[in-house]
Amino acid sequence: MLRRAGKRAVPGTTPALSSLLGRKEMELGGRVLIADDEAPCRLIVARILKQAGYSCSCAQDAQGTLALLERDAFDLLITDLRMPGNTGLELVEQVKELADGVPVIVMTGFPSVETAVEAVHLPVVAYLVKPIRRRNLLQNVEKAMAWGRLRRATEEAARRTERCLAQLAELTRMLKSAHNAHALALDAGLDPRGA
């Protein structure tokens, strides 16, 4: 679903979600890294996504992709299976270690059951066969972006819960300490209020 934010389409978001997450990339639709050694495919995918409101960077090989991932933060990686430095899912495995949490869309002109099954165990949210139709690409990108937002929100909720639990444990310790001091004062026949 495309919603309008000013004059620019923002795929898969609502104003409330954008303000809740407070991410500048949400206003732009998200940051996508496109990795493909075939320039026409890479440029067409980038043009489609830019028209839909996404910010795109491109790499033509695995080494360039990893360098960009080390330097910048991305919301999504769209990668070809076969390109220099990558003959299968090696790049996706490295991305999992380097940029954990970044969803990946794999696109290939050489699909196989083996790579599709392997992809299930990696952060691959879609496995697309070239040539890719515009609508299919956009639907899968929107789904991947939603998955990434949900994962980040879940991780942030877990961090907040941990902080709250730590604060609660500290308050519990302080209350027990105060209770024990009060009980000792009563046992000694002292007025615990200090009077």
Image (spheres, rainbow, N blue to C red):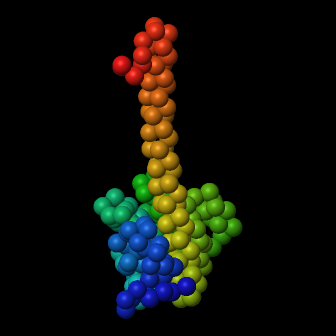
Quadrant where the N terminus sits is: bottom right
Quadrant where the C terminus sits is: top left
Residue located 40% across and 86% down the image = 5
Q: Is residue 194 above or below residue 106?
A: above
The x and y percentages for residue 28 are 37, 79
Residue located 46% across and 58% down the image = 95
Residue located 46% across and 49% down the image = 159
Q: Is residue 125 visible?
A: yes
Q: Nearer the viewer, residue 138 or 158?
A: 158
Q: Nearer the viewer, residue 39 or 28?
A: 28
Specify the farthest residue to the front: 195
Residue located 44% across and 78% down the image = 15
Q: Is residue 36 visible?
A: no
Could you tell whether 14 is left or right of 133 in the image? Answer: left
Could you tell whether 33 is left or right of 142 in the image? Answer: left
The x and y percentages for residue 74 are 39, 67
The x and y percentages for residue 55 are 37, 78
Q: Nearer the viewer, residue 170 or 97?
A: 170
Specify the farthest residue to the top: 188
